[in-house]
Amino acid sequence: MKNRLLAPLAMLLALVAPAVALEIKSDARPGALPPLTAPGETAINRADGRFFYRDEAGNRVGGLLPDLDANGYLKFRNGMVLGRNVGGKLVPQPERIEIQGSGSNGDASQLSVKPEADGGQAYGLAERMRDEVNVMAFIPPSRRTAIRDYSATTDLTPYLRKAFATGKRVRFPAGRYPVCDSVPLASGQEVVGDGVVSTYLWVSSCFNMSASAVVPVATGDSSGWDGLGIRFDQSGATNRATLRRYPWAMDISSATRFKIGRIRIGAAWNGIRCVGNCGGFDGGHLEIGAFHTGAIFDGPLDFVHMNSGHSWPWDIAGRAELMAAYTDGTTVGFEFGRVDGLDIKSLNTFSNKIVGNANGNDGAARQIALMQLDGDNSTFETVAGDWQIGLLSTTKSGEKHVPAVASSAGNVNVASIRFWGANNGSYLRVTGGVFAINGGTLEQRADRPAAEVSGGRLVLTSASLQPLVGSEGPARTQAFVKQTGAGILVATGNTATLKANGGGGPLFEIGTDAPGNIVTENVMSNWGLSLPAIATSGTYGDNSVPANPYVSGIAVGREYVKRFTGTFDASGNAVFPHGLPASGSSQSVDRIVGVTAFGTDPNGFRRAYPQTRDLGWENSNIALAGGGASFAGLPFVATVRYR
């Protein structure tokens, strides 16, 4: 209806306070009206509610009169409701009001809404549209029902683009919004939905695969996104090879100070991309389910803040074939390169990786208060840069032969760890850089090292070490913490809280003696310390005496040192008593950890004797084989370490 709907009200007012003298004529015959001859004359048909009158100019004007029924509704006899009498006030309830004239072009200040709250002022539709837009105002009415009942399949890209082109804050009511191409977000523009579950963009096979992203954010400052999800259709996929490799869900690479309140991205190939200066990013709660990369931040020249990042199989978990692809060990949940200040309160993954790539910067440490690696193939891998992590936890079931944490370069400092379960690869593998742990609990239910270092430096201090054996785990044959190759192990002040009943294998194993190795002041709790036959460069003594002297033939406890000097005999050999009690006593030969010997050869060079065939001991003596008669009378020095 148009302005003619208002004519009956005007007529009623005219009847009450006529501008000219009125003469009202009536007729009860359906469709019949008395004749009108003079201005002011009014004719009413009481049967159907039709009326006519002559205005001051003598023009004939007509329309329908509403009736007030027993329920207080003011409506026309054709059934159209105009309003209802509520407490003496007419509350309009028309099916539709269409404003013509100047209002049709947006100047609808005459039609306003006034909040009932104290201090509320009239707020016109024109003002509202100047401040923000509702995306439904750009979508044809015929398509809105399907959006609201989540059955929409028709592409809405053109309508959404027009809404976004306003540059204003765009509000999305709850519903499903299918798109087949990108919907660019302007600089400074904000998009708000009714919740990441109830409001989302739907991306399916129609989407333009050459687009840079579903939502590319323009270069600029302080755009935003809150309460709106982005979900992808993977209905035809049966494995990783058949997944649809859609463009990024969102690209914020050149959008500084971009803000996300809440977002959920489901079944994407790639989630959020920042490869460039998206410095000042502020993320509230990011829920991302992606098969390739959930989010990458590499290049921000300012802080990146995040309250919570959660990589989980959103829109994936309900299908076994999709879960098999998601958990195959190749999915990256979060990747970080150069970030000039990373500030994350909580970063969590399920069966995928957190990666620090080769662009990681030194000095401006990437800081994460809590990192949780849940499930097999949930790992933390770093190859460059500095990290500071408050709490680092990981849970494993023993299905995968991969380390939960792998560090090959850079500096990683962790205040507290909680490594739980059985990982068939080492929980922690350090091949380069420095990885320092300053407390927490390191557990291993499998017969594998819980931590190993073959390059770089592993520093382990003030931690609770739990090599589970007996009823809680297998008899151990491998070291709990293992050093090999060029790696350096510093382990001080740690406590093995579970005794080695039914166990075996050392608590610490040094494969290569080096000056930087330090294993001191640890509470061994019956677990052993395994050292090379010659181990004089590192520091391996002064660990707490265990409750029992032996664990599967491996000597443990406080270390003692004896030094012997002498000369080789005529045959170039040496046999001398070590002075330790016989086997079975508290300080017997069984407690010898190692013997180191150096001799001077005929050319005046000092020679070490690491070979077992050249160096040995028994209940009373130590035997040292020289180089034959040419060594006769030359001096040697031998050091015996025992517990």
Image (spheres, grey):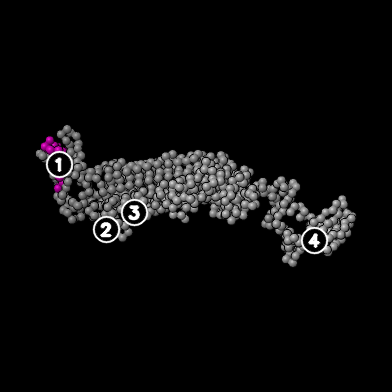
The x and y percentages for residue 44 are 83, 60
Q: Nearer the viewer, mark 2 or mark 4?
A: 4
- CA distance for labels 1 and 4: 128 Å
Q: Earlier in the sequence, mark 4 or mark 3?
A: 4
Q: Position of residue 526 (x, y in %)?
A: 27, 55
Location of residue 496 with respect to 300 vertically, above or below:
below
Report the front residue among 487 and 590. 487
Q: Viewed as shown, does residue 593 lie left or right of 427? A: left
Instruction: Assign a secondary structure to mark 4.
Output: loop
Question: Which residue is label 3 attached to?
Answer: 444
Decide which of tag 3 and tag 2 comes sooner along the chain.
3
Describe the element under mark 2 as helix, strand or loop: loop
Amino acid type, mark 3: Gln
Q: Give the percent coordinates (x, y) of residue 73.
A: 73, 63
> In the shown orientation, is residue 36 left or right of residue 320?
right
- Residue 32 falls left or right of residue 132: right
What amino acid is at disc 1?
Answer: Ala
| Residue drawn at 49 percent across, 40 percent down | 275
Spatial CA span between label 2 and label 1: 38 Å
> Does dot 1 land on a helix, a strand or a loop?
strand
